[in-house]
Image (cartoon, rainbow, N blue to C red):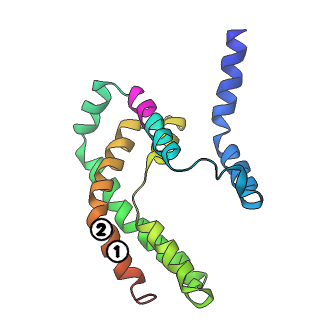
Amino acid sequence: MICGMVRILSWLTNAFPLWILLCSTIALFEPSIFTWFKGPLIVWGLAVIMLGMGLTLNFSDVKGVLSLPRAGVIGVICQFLLMPALGWGVATMLKLDEIDPSLAVGLILVSCCPGGTASNVVAYLAKANVALSVLMTMCSTFAAIVMTPLLTKWLAGALIE
């Protein structure tokens, strides 16, 4: 019985992209189903998720990531080079500035923001290096204090005052 339950839970976990697509579609047509989750609930939800991610790590995972600082540095650099460039490129390709400049600015702003808790969850589900994901999230969050406004002004400054 436990083996069957583990198999079902494993399948449900591996179907994470399906759940995201399904919930996103539902939220598009019925946002009220999801808007109850706000304010302090978001803070507590993120805290529980981050605690869960932290509990999956051990000292050897952290030690292994710290022994390869180049991977973290490359990840953070890509976060602030590739993502903003792709956001600007998509906004330009779709001519969002002609449709509504705020759409282009919004896309560029989001692409200039660092990865967050969700990237750590996806790294965990993909059986990737969670410690590296957490390290990159931490470093890019600190860098975002300067980089997000700087990149947004540079890439979207001509679209808004």
Number of marks present in the image shown: 2
Q: Is residue 71 left or right of residue 11?
A: left
Q: Which residues are magenta?
A: 50-56
Q: Nearer the viewer, residue 157 or 92?
A: 157
Residue 128 seen from this side = no
Considering the image in quadrants, where does the C terminus appear?
bottom left
Considering the image in quadrants, where does the N terminus appear?
top right
Q: Residue 24's spot in the image, x, y percent? A: 69, 54
CA gap, disc 2 to disc 1?
A: 6 Å
**Can you say whether 38 is above or below 44 in the image?**
below
**Can you say whether 126 is above or below 33 in the image?**
above
Q: Residue 40's spot in the image, x, y percent? A: 48, 45
**Can you say whether 153 is above or below 55 in the image?**
below
Q: What residue is at 26 percent from the left and 67 percent from the top?
A: 146
Q: Which mark identifies residue 147?
A: 2
Query: Which residue was labeled with disc 1?
Result: 151
Label 1 packing within 10 angstroms: few (<14), some (14-19), many (20+): many
Cβ–Cβ under 8 Å for marks 2 and 1: yes
